[in-house]
Amino acid sequence: MRRPIWVSFAVACALAVAGATALDALVFRTPWYVSILEPDSSTGLFELVLARERDAQQRNGANLVVTLGDSRFAYAPRLANEVASRTGYVFRHAGVAGSDARAWYYMMRDLDPTRQRYRAVVIGMNDYDDEDEFNDPNDDIRALHYVIARLRLRDIPEFAASFDSAALRWEALRGAVWKGIVLQADLQDFLAHPNWRLGKVAQYRRFFDFWTYNYLETDRTMTGLAIDWKTMRATLPPGLNADQKGTIENALLRDPAPQTGRVAAFRRHWLGKIIDLYRGSPTKVVFLRLPRGPLVRPDNLVHKLSSSVREFAARPNVMLVPEHAFDSLEHPELFRDAIHLNRQGIARFSPMMAGEVGRLLDAPAQRASR
């Protein structure tokens, strides 16, 4: 008896899907493809940072501190470590520009699988209060591209469900199951220029740590910037470029968004997962509020409803650097735009940050010795 056509069609489709899934896994779920990623891509940069910090674990002692954040956590580990004789700690940075707490969780899960390698994980925050903006933090699809190489099959349901938009949930689900969809352009570029890619990858592997550890930020400043907060009008210094002007509009002159609690929920989930990673371990999770900008928006512009970071402080393995520890750096001459420190700002912030974290970590031991 012949099988109905629809049965044959269903079997053929199932076999095609199974074959495509197996091929995708063979190529993209093995260390081989991670080793040839474009270094300047989101995925490639994330993987370079993770590999660099794994190597750094082997070269440093027990008193190792890792920091997490986006590009606003602008400090120089080299300068922080120049005061290691005073702080007692070696600092390394596992943050990635443009990333968020969702990406940081996967970074730390795979960077420190034993939960024993660091004395502290230091997370740089824009604010200890939860302020919603018009963009939904759950729907930042960049997270998929940063962490695609880290996603395991069991991660897929939670990761895909973390997006609010149905279209983005499908994009995340499809991309996490078949990683080749996310990495298609990268693979095409590799196949078009394999020798060039392999040479670039080899160069980055050899020099990435040196380049990043010794990086010098621009000395461009925002000197002359002034804002009338009543009229929300800015007086701009001469010679600002488009990026600098854009950060002023987006960070300082932005309209207040409705406070819905989305940021608080996002932080509680993903930062909470980082904290849970280290529950019962000797590693402390430390939050610090970054220098906010060349000028600081008045608090009365928006009524913030919660502070998830302060809530976390009630947990036994969480510490907060004093909220106003870096207020002295919030001046136009120390910022290159409205959100990022410049070379002079980084030179001041780096040892200050190391000192504050060192004092905080040593405080319990000091109290116990009294």
Image (spheres, helix red, strand yellow):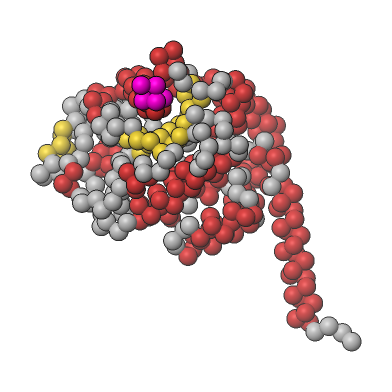
**Which quadrant of the view contains residue 249?**
top left
**Which quadrant of the view contains residue 193?**
top right
Quick check: is 102 in the magenta stretch?
no
Bounds of the magenta segment? 365-370
Residue 221 image offset from top left, x and y in percent: 27, 24
In which quadrant of the rendered image does the N terminus lie? bottom right
Foreground residue, 84 or 127? 84
Q: Is residue 146 left or right of residue 7?
A: left
Residue with the most extreme right position: 1
Q: In terms of secondary structure, what is the magenta stretch mainly?
A: helix
Residue 330 image offset from top left, x and y in percent: 24, 29
Q: Is residue 325 left or right of residue 285?
A: left
In which quadrant of the rendered image does the C terminus lie? top left
Q: Is residue 45 left or right of residue 89?
A: right
**Residue for point 20% across, 40% down:** 297
Residue with the most extreme front position: 370
Q: Is residue 219 visible?
A: no
| Residue 233 drawn above or below residue 198 | below
**Residue for point 73% across, 58% down:** 20
